[in-house]
Structure formats: structure tokens, C-alpha cells
Amino acid sequence: MQDLFVNNNGAVLPNKGATIAAGNRSYLYGDGLFESIRIMNGKPINMVNHFNRMVEGAKAIKMRFPSFFTVEFFEDKVKELISLSGIKEGGKCRISLDRALGGTYIPETNEISYFIEVYPYESNYFELNSKGYEVDIYREIKKQKNFLANFKTKNGLLYVMTAIAAKEKGLDDYLLINENDAVIESSNSNLFVVSNGVLYTPSLEDGCLAGTMRMQVINIALTHGIKVYECAILPQNLLAADEIFLTNAIRGIVWVGGYRTKRYFNTVGRKIQSYLNDYWDNQLNETEE
């Protein structure tokens, strides 16, 4: 097994044993943010969009974002870990931003510490799942629409409970609803519905995560002449759809094969997955030239 490394606020350490300090506010209170970033050809992709969401998220939870925290700063730190960890093709990275040590519910400071970890991933490019996911709607907890809803905060208990419940029901995932019973996302992904060749996805105002892959799929679809509408999606819309697929930064696109008794195709999802791979293949080849 290859040796992996982490970066704990500037200290590069082997990924073995304890590396997070006692009193870490993310550990104690969920007081922080994180980004999950895909690695292709041994390089992190989509860093600008991940960085922009980190900046906005830090502002939302009143953490002070230092001026030296730039895209280039984090990209260099991630690439250093990728190199040390010997990841030459597919991988995944997690960047955590935590409020600095001190205080209880009232922090002593709004300064930030960071933690970066990298891991190999089984495929270099995005690969569509061979078997469609089976999903249903999770109704035990509804996601609230508020100013935190669009960001990846460390308060992930809603998603954990959703994923556990899906597993207990023998499903691949559950779909979450908001206070208005609109379907907004799954336990780990954004949601797209396809009807008559048109993409529909919940709006950010409905409380879904502002996913980096969500944004990229919208842009790539529009580039290839596929119409996209951001709007409320209700359970009845799922039953009328031709396709449903889920998106996240690591997997790209995951197609849904069934919702209750309804069955789905994956024609558009497969096409967009191919567009994604072509796009990043071109981007990575350009940076190598």
C-alpha cells in the first residue's frame, strides 16, 4: 500500500495516526467547510470553482479568509501532496477549512486553519455506473432553506442520516426534500431531471448545494445546445421524467435506473459524461503542452 501524506495547516505529515490537533473546532462543533476535489492525470481539476465556493462559504459563516489563500496557494499544496503520495492518475482530494482553535460556541477568533488530504481513486476519468441507482424520497428530515444551504459545511448529519436510511431500505440513495416538499438533491449529489431532451435542476433558492459539478454540467449542456432550466422539482415530476441523474465532484454523473416503480434511460446522462471527460482531457493536455 502506497504511503499517503496530508497537510495540516502548513505541516506536511504522513497520513498515519493522529494528525488533527485536540480542540479542533470542526471536530468539536462542525465549525468549518470542506471541498471534495477530483484528481485526473495526477492533477486537481476545477480548482477555481472549488476555491470560489470556499471563499463564499467562509464569508457566510464569518471566518476571516486570509489574502494569501489564493487558488494558486491551494493548488500548489494539493500538487505537493499528490506528488509525495505517488498519485499519477485518478485521485480525490479534500480541503478542510476550520475556524482556529479556541472558545466554545463563541469562538475566540475567526481566523482559519486548513487541512488537506489526498487519496488514489480507482479510475482516472469519470465513469458512468453500469447499473442504475435505485432511489426514493427521504421524508424523516427536511432540509431547511437558509443562507448556509448552498455550502459544504462540516455539519453533515442530515446527509449521514439520509445515507444510512437508504442503506437500511436496500436503496442506493435517498432524495432530500425542502420545507415546501420540493426535491432538491440526494445524500451526496445534486439532482438533474431530463424530460424531452431538456435538463431541469433545482434552483439554489430551493436550498440545494451549490455543487461545482452541478455548475459544470449546466455549462457543458448549454455549450452543446442542451436546454437547462433551474426550477422547483416535485415528486410528480420524477414520475414524468425520461431520465434522472445525480452529479458530484468525484463521480461526475451517476444515472438513476429507478424511482419506485418508474424506470429510466441514461441517454442524455451518458452523453454529458462523455462531454465532461472530453473537456477535462483537453484542459489537462493544454496545461501539459
Image (tube, rainbow, N blue to C red):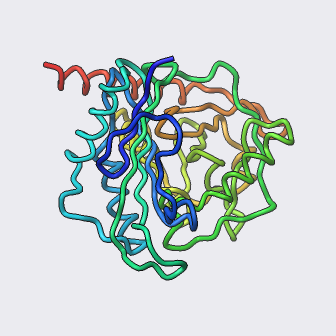
- Residue at position x 40%, y 29% from top? 276
- The quadrant in which residue 68 appears is bottom left
Q: Residue at x 38, y 38 (%)?
A: 13
Q: Position of residue 58 (x, y in %)?
A: 37, 66
**Relative to 177, is 47 above or below?**
above
Left or right: 136 with respect to 251? right
Q: Nearer the viewer, residue 49 or 233?
A: 49
117, above or below 275, in the image: below
Picture coordinates of residue 33 (x, y %)? Answer: 46, 59
Q: Position of residue 97 (x, y in %)?
A: 40, 57
In screen coordinates, is 281 left or right of 126? Answer: left
> Which quadrant of the structure image shows residue 239?
top right
Q: Nearer the viewer, residue 87 or 285?
A: 87
Q: Is residue 78 visible?
A: yes
Compare residues 140 and 257 and report the one nearer the observer.
Answer: 140
Q: Tell me the residue at 51%/64% (across/down).
A: 23
Task: Give the x, y percent position of residue 106.
Answer: 49, 82
